[in-house]
Image (tube, rainbow, N blue to C red):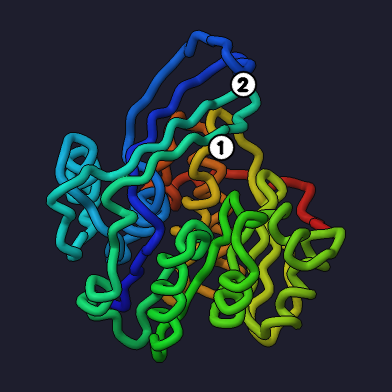
């Protein structure tokens, strides 16, 4: 079976549940804390739990955070073939989680930022594999040119791109060639509106599909998503009602399950339905890498009721 390669950086998330964000110079007591592997691990673990081979295309390092990340990857059966950085640990991301599930990030880079073109060339990506790129991968000069140069020469490889939460920070000189190369654009409602100028998710998917001639998925939380497969009109796929505990990593779980289902031969509509359900399950649990296994997802879907609000007009 073809494999999913993920370039989105694996880091360690330090999640703190707070009643409110502190003012500058202030202090707030966290009611709950969690230290876990995050970043690209969220999407890869979601895909791996569906029975798909996932490979981390980034770089680990040496130190306690790298040990934690490596153990998490090993536990999920995710390969990390790039040689580690001997001189530094992987980065960290402090996640401040508010009562409504919203999260605020503070990131410090580490070994993942030392990835080089020679590392990418050793991965052995072949035709029919899938490569998942994050907006964080094409945001910074130097790293962005490396990633864009690499994906430009991948022949017969399906490239998926999620601009992530920092869309407005990606320079157009990097964003435009990335969007021109992708086979599937995976984004949320806000990002879809910003990229298309359209007022609704369905209109945004139609605009973006027409502009790039590619597949588009626009996630809209509990309402579900709109999927526009190449050559087909956009379709609304119903979401599922859920108890929201933590929105961190929900989009990554959706991406991982959607791409895994495509690799398994599902139609885009069916892949989207299962991705909607997996994301609904994930947000009901504290922590980013909380996607279900294939068996858990199958069981949940047998009893789940889709949301009535599936128009996404």
Q: Is residue 234 toward the left or the right of residue 78 in the image?
A: right
Residue 23 higher or lower than 158, as above or below: above
Tell me the number on the disc at residue 99. Answer: 2
Residue beneath label 1, please? 247
Q: Is residue 102 toward the left or the right of residue 308 in the image?
A: left
- Viewer-nearest residue: 127 or 180: 180
Residue 184 occupies quadrant: bottom right
Question: Percent x, y for residue 16?
Answer: 46, 22
Tell me the number on the disc at residue 132. Answer: none
Which is more N-terminal, label 1 or label 2? Answer: 2
| Residue positioned 60% across, 81% down in the render | 180
Question: Percent x, y for residue 73?
Answer: 23, 50
Residue 307 higher or lower than 184, as above or below: above
Element on which disc 2 rests: loop
| Residue positioned 65% across, 26% down in the render | 100
Residue 247 higher or lower than 111, as above or below: above
Question: Percent x, y for residue 298?
Answer: 44, 52
| Residue positioned 45% across, 73% down in the render | 145
- Viewer-nearest residue: 58 or 203: 58
Between the C-alphas of marks 2 and 1, the distance is 11 Å
The reply to whether residue 292 is in sight is yes
Element on which disc 1 rests: loop
Q: Could you tell me which quadrant the C terminus lies in?
A: bottom right
Label 2 neighbourhood size at 10 Å, few (<14), some (14-19), many (20+)?
Answer: few
Q: Could you tell me which quadrant the N terminus lies in?
A: bottom left
The reply to whether residue 238 is in sight is no
Q: Is residue 106 toward the left or the right of residue 229 in the image?
A: left
| Residue positioned 74% across, 73% down in the render | 234
């Amino acid at each position: 079976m073809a494999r999913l390669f993920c370039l989105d950086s694996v880091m360690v998330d330090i999640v703190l549940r707070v009643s409110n964000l502190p003012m500058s110079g202030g202090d707030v007591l966290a009611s709950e804390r969690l230290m876990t592997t995050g970043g690209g691990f969220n999407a890869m673990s979601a895909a791996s739990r569906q029975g798909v081979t996932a490979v981390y295309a980034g770089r680990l390092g040496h130190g306690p955070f790298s040990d934690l990340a490596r153990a998490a990857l090993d536990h999920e059966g995710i390969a990390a073939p790039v040689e580690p950085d001997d001189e530094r640990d992987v980065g960290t991301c402090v996640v401040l989680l508010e009562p409504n599930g919203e999260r605020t990030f503070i990131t410090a880079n580490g070994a993942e930022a030392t990835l080089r073109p020679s590392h990418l060339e050793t991965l052995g990506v072949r035709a029919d594999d899938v490569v998942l790129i994050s907006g964080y991968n094409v945001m910074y000069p130097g790293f962005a040119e490396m990633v864009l140069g690499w994906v430009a020469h991948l022949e017969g490889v399906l490239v998926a791109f999620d601009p992530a939460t920092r869309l407005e920070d990606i320079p157009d000189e990097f964003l435009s060639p990335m969007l021109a190369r992708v086979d599937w654009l995976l984004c949320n409602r806000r990002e879809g509106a910003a990229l298309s100028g359209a007022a609704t998710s369905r209109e945004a998917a139609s605009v973006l599909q027409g502009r790039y001639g590619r597949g588009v998925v626009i996630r809209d939380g509990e309402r579900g998503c709109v999927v526009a497969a190449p050559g087909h009109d956009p379709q609304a796929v119903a979401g599922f009602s859920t108890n929201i505990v933590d929105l961190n990593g929900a989009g990554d779980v959706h991406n991982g399950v959607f791409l895994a289902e495509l690799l398994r031969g599902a139609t885009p509509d069916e892949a989207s339905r299962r991705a909607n359900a997996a994301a609904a399950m994930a947000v009901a649990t504290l922590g980013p890498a909380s996607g279900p296994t294939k068996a858990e997802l199958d069981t949940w879907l047998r009893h789940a009721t889709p949301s009535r609000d599936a128009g996404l007009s």
